[in-house]
Amino acid sequence: MEHLVSLRLEHTAVEMLPSSIGNLNRLQDLNLRSCKQLKDVPTSISSLTNLKRLDFIGCWRLEKLPSRSFGFRSLEELELSFSGILEIPASIKQASRLSMLDVRCCRQLQSIPELPVLCNVKAEDCTSLKIVSSSRTALTQGWDKPNYFFRVFTNCPKLDNNSRSNIMDEAQITIMRMATVAPLKDYFLPHHPWPQINIVCRGKEIPNWFSYQNEGSSVDIELCPDWFRTGLFGFALSVVSWVSEAQYFFWSVRANFIVKFMGESHELFTSEYIGHINFNNGQHHVLVWNEAFRSEEVVKNCSPDVYKLAKEASVVFCPVAFDERPACASRLKVESCGLCPLYAEDAEKFKFGHVFK
């Protein structure tokens, strides 16, 4: 048994894991999905130093994990969705390789502690969630570790103001740090040389670090003479959205960046935030994402005079349903929007603590 790598007990009637589970020191995958009678996890689980994936999806009676359960640093995925979990142990920040925390539909969960730098979060329908601690320290320390990054907090109606602020501050840190790392040519798509950032949580205001903001679904921009200078590595985009009728369907918010020159409009690029609707009627959510690119790639789309001499631009945001049904897209409304140009020199200042807002 000491050579066991994967243990799958899903859909069994197990109520408690034995303390001897800690002896399976080569275990990498522990699957307890839909073990609806499971109530307890022994502290010896922290001895599983090679564990990469831990699955408690659908363990309705499981309310807590041992406080020392994240002493192991090999864990990459922690699946807790549809469980009865009440809190996440603070020791989770020690799981430096953790890339996914899934707590969707954990309706008794009230708080999420500081997380490791690489950790993405799915926290949809956590209707009791009040506190999301800041992971600013971890994100700053991991400045040189670019990665695809998303933190989704849709239909979390009890999130307090401080938690929403923490989530949006982390969005700024994560997006700005992309300017200080080299593009990753092999892993990411050619038109996205830097990782994509996607953040969403309940709220009615565009984050204050967005330099251009406006009510409605479009924002106008005055372009300075050297706006397309070397060091421009993309834009941060944001919308405040709400749904007129709750229904689950896939959608995107599409942003068209249009430069105005000599009485003509030229589309410089199109960007999309892709997600799905699963929040209640009338709930406002703030979406933040980035559109990262190399300047030399974008200029192929139009004449140099357009991006060098243009003085005006506008960005128009439009909801789009994946199946293109107009009725679905019309349920999602863009109430306000924002745009922030991202320059490498600003990111360097941000990196060394000169925070601008």
Image (spheres, rainbow, N blue to C red):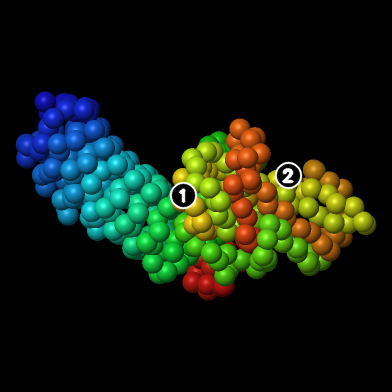
Residue 236, image x, y percentages = 61, 57
Query: Where does label 1 land, which residue?
Result: 279
Of residue 236 and residue 109, the one placed in the foreground of this image is 109
Residue 87, image x, y percentages = 24, 55
> In percent of the image, x 81 and y 66: which residue is there?
225
Badge 2, how many Cα within 10 Å: few under 14, some, many 20+? few
Of residue 151 and residue 96, the one placed in the foreground of this image is 151
Residue 73 in sight here? yes
Give the quadrant of the C terminus: bottom right
> In percent of the image, x 25 and y 43: which residue is there?
83
172, above or below 188, in the image: below
- Label located before the other in sequence (1 or 2): 1
195, above or below 129, in the image: above
Badge 1, how many Cα within 10 Å: few under 14, some, many 20+? many
Residue 174 in sight here? no
Judged from this view, the residue extending furthest toward the right is 262
For residue 287, side relative to residue 73 (left or right): right
Q: Give the residue type at disc 1.
A: Phe
Tag shown at residue 78: none
> In percent of the image, x 48 and y 65: which residue is there?
169
For residue 273, side relative to residue 139 (left or right): right
Image depth: mark 1 or mark 2 in front: 1
Question: Do callouts 1 and 2 mark residues in contact (Cβ within 8 Å)?
Answer: no
Callout 1 secondary element: loop
For residue 16, side relative to residue 213 (left or right): left
Q: Give the residue type at disc 2.
A: Glu
Q: What is the quadrant of residue 164 in the picture? A: bottom left
Query: Where does label 2 land, which residue?
Result: 297
Callout 2 secondary element: helix
Give the quadrant of the N terminus: top left
